[in-house]
Amino acid sequence: MKFLKILAFPFSLLYGCIVFLRNKFYDWNFIKSEKFALPIISVGNLSMGGTGKTPHIEYLIRLFKNEFTIATLSRGYGRKTSGFILSQNKSTTFEIGDEPLQFKTKFPELTVAVDEKRVRGIKKLLELQPTLQTILLDDAFQHRAVKPGLSIVLTDYNYIYLNDFVVPSGNLREFKTGIKRADIIIVTKCPEDLLEKERTRLLTKINPLKHQHIYFSYIKYGNLTPLNSDNTKRDTTEHYFNKSYTMILLTGIANTSALEDYLKSKSKNILAAKFPDHHVFTMNDIERVKEIFTTIASENKIIVTTEKDAMRLKGIEFKNVLNDLPFFYIPIEIDFKDTDKEEFNKKLINYVRTN
């Protein structure tokens, strides 16, 4: 693996330099970024994925929704459509992508839109809903055509961007110096009981600029939830964990390590069925998982997936097969500890109120 990374290094350097030059053209105003009158909040990362953008955007939705009129705008990665689409309650992943569908499913009253051209998407949203008070841009740190008022960058506690390099020899979308554009850096997937000396170590290592604020978030796992609402198998989450069920973990996300560690703390028998990020599941995939399930001798067995993957598995074509299986997804939320939570909430709310 190290040898392959060494071979890929020249390509990483070339790609990184191209992105660096592109960013400089925006910085020097050779290419224009468009700024909007209302508060625009961008949530993104330097890495290719797996830092937890979706639950962090959901956190912001919960923070804002009772006081402000808000919308989310995503590219709609993995959708089979193009252009601007405003999500409806019956939208599918093929129309808008899995993450926007998750937002709409959990917050039906929320305005959720997709557009690969974010400037156009923002203008369309403002035409349709002139009373909008803020727009959350999903995965837009490298989308320089829009100049957000507040830029949030996420980095995984276990894979800090400082220890990485540009693709293909690493996992970064640009050189790590790009972090200078961030207003807020959130270290995600931290231990809930993160020690003060570890916080200090990370703060020293990241060494934020004067205008930057750093916060530390952690994951809260919800209860196992049946994939289909008419699934009659509804024992409590504690039942499955206490009985040490064998779990097949079916995923199509960028980084499964945190979820795997959590489930391994609850069961000794975890079988991972991993697919690439945003994988479009097929009936063959489901049949393969079902075959693995049937070969497990124990009667104490279930299939678990992520909430994002569940959006792609709820299609009508899978319903008859999945309804016969004890198939669950596990929702997640993020939270901040103590003063981090208070300071972060105050900063974000004040930003929207005063801009």
Image (cartoon, grey):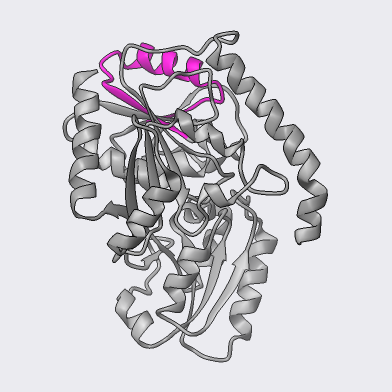
Residue 185 image offset from top left, x and y in percent: 39, 41
- The question of residue 216 being in magenta is answered with no
Span of residues in magenta = 112-138
Asked if 121 appears above or below 185 in the picture, the reply is: above
Hey, which quadrant is residue 68 in on the image? Answer: top left
- Position of the C terminus, as image quadrant, is top left
Residue that protrudes farthest toward the bottom in the picture: 297
Residue at 22 percent of width and 48 percent of height: 341
Q: Is residue 77 left or right of residue 228?
A: right
Q: Is residue 21 left or right of residue 3?
A: left
Asked if 116 appears above or below 303 in the picture, the reply is: above
Residue at 61 percent of width and 68 percent of height: 273
Given residues 106 and 271, the one toward you in this image is: 271
Asked if 115 appears above or below 96 in the picture, the reply is: above
> In this rendering, does residue 57 appear at all?
yes
Residue 50 image offset from top left, x and y in percent: 52, 51
- Position of the N terminus, as image quadrant, is bottom right
Hey, which quadrant is residue 243 in on the image? Answer: bottom left
> In this rendering, does residue 52 appear at all?
no
